[in-house]
Image (spheres, grey):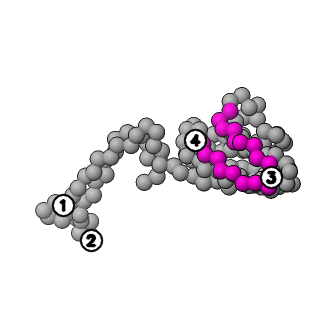
Amino acid sequence: WENVTAGEHNLSVQLTNNDHTPVVPLAFETVNVTVGGNATGNETAVTISAQDMAFDTDTITVPAGANVTMTFDNRDAGVPHNVAVYDSPLRSEEIFAGEVVTGPAETTYTFTAPSEPGTYYFQCDIHPSMNGDFIVE
């Protein structure tokens, strides 16, 4: 199951004939599942690279509330970069700011995407001209 919301859920299965009529006597089973408040079922992997003072993408798309694992590859030798996610280009609210790494180097960031769908913003905090849309669906 993917994108299961927190709370109680029921899964029922009933045995039927090939014409979709129930088998007699009825044969069915129900399973009750409770999903905790912090569980989203969304594990999302993202890869982004920096080379020649630019990211290799200007759009990152993830599911709402996803547990994001971002692999960041800084290919610029001797140049520090990071990836940070903000509410907008105004950077009023920081969602995530990754550790700055000097290239060539690779690091892995983990964070939770916003639960509210929308278009957010990502950038390199050292070089804000390196940026793009962080889309939450």
Q: Which segment did they paint magenta?
A: 94-111
At label 3, counting other C-alpha atoms closer than 10 Å, the crowd grade (few under 14, some 14-19, many 20 or more) is some
Q: Which mark is residue 112?
A: 4
Of marks 4 and 1, which one's residue comes earlier in the chain? 1
Give the residue type at disc 2: Asn
Residue that mark 2 sits on? 18
Give the residue type at disc 3: Gly
Question: Up-down: is 116 above or below 18?
Answer: above
Question: Up-down: is 41 above or below 114?
Answer: below
Q: Residue at x 72, y 34 (%)?
A: 88
Residue 71 seen in this snapshot? yes
At label 1, counting other C-alpha atoms closer than 10 Å, the crowd grade (few under 14, some 14-19, many 20 or more) is few
Residue that mark 3 sits on? 103
Do the numbered discs 3 and 1 sit on residues whose CB atoms are within 8 Å?
Answer: no
The question of residue 37 being in magenta is answered with: no
Q: Which mark is residue 27?
A: 1
Q: Which mark is residue 67?
A: none
